[in-house]
Amino acid sequence: MSDLRNYACVTASYWGFTLSDGALRMLVLLHFHHLGYSPLDLAFLFLLYEAMGIVTNFVGGWIGARFGLRLTLFAGLTIQILALILLSLLQNDWAISLSVTYVMGAQALSGIAKDLTKMSSKSAVKLVVADEGLLFKWISLLTGSKNALKGIGFFLGGLLLESLGFQYALWAMALTLTAVLIFAVTAVQGELGKAKSKITGKDLFSKSREINILSFARIFLFASRDVWFV
């Protein structure tokens, strides 16, 4: 029952994060498009977001197994709040090259946050579902809910930009995520997902060659998706 409660709290926190992540992507894209940034400049804004997501996805499972999923969840939420605050400090009179570099750095933090939080939720489900067939169904439902919420987040990003403006929208999102973080810290208990045996560097890779190849292939799948998005 404790694992089920923790999983519910982790997933609720992840859902809150996903809404903010979708909103942020649309907020950044629409705001800088409105400022007249070129398609190439817009693409650069998301470059480190995805690159750091790949890196975090690679090491995130190892971090979660070694230090527990509470740490990865809290770290993901905290880093996203930091990224939102940093973006809110951006000034419109900065040179385009400086603005692009600055936003790329903030987006890199957001990419790290996204995969730490996502990994926490997808790993937590394994603690409450033992049967592999049922596990696939639960993860499919979680992935489906994530995609639906990210779509809602896209809408919220446009709505917030239109109603509050770029800076105030970011502050509102940071405040909301702070509430989500406080909820997670108080609700998620125990050493969730922490491995009982020692975790080493070689555990970054699967023992299955096929899974390692599949994981590498996913990089190109998500790269093509983001070409379409931008």
Image: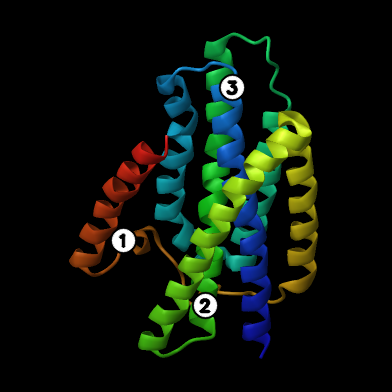
Q: Amino acid at mark 1?
A: Phe
User: How much space separates mark 1 and mark 3, taking CA atoms?
Assistant: 43 Å
Residue on which disc 3 sits: 34
Could you tell me residue 87's position as x and y percent? 67, 30
Which secondary structure, mark 2?
helix
| Residue of label 1 | 205
Q: Nearer the viewer, mark 3 or mark 2?
A: 3
Mark 3 or mark 1, which is nearer the start of the sequence?
3
Residue found 43% across the figure and 28% down from its top = 43
Q: Is residue 214 above or below residue 90?
A: below
Picture disc at residue 25: none
Would residue 110 be found to the left or right of residue 136 on screen? right
Residue type, mark 2 in image: Val
Q: Which residue is mark 2?
A: 125
Residue drawn 71% across the image and 40% down it: 160
Q: Quadrant of the C terminus?
A: top left
Amino acid type at mark 3: His
Q: Position of residue 190 (x, y in %)?
A: 69, 77
The image's colour scheme reads rainbow
Which element carries disc 1, helix, strand or loop? loop
Q: Residue at x 67, y 58 (%)?
A: 74
Residue 99, x across and y down, in percent: 58, 18
Residue contact at pointers 1 and 3, CB within 8 angstroms: no
Instruction: Please report whichever mark, 3 or 2, sits nearer to the chain's N-terminal start.
Output: 3
Residue in the image at 76% along x and 36% along y: 163
Question: To which quarter of the image does residue 149 belong?
Answer: bottom right
Q: Residue 128: image x %, image y %?
A: 54, 85
Q: What element does badge 3 sit on?
A: helix
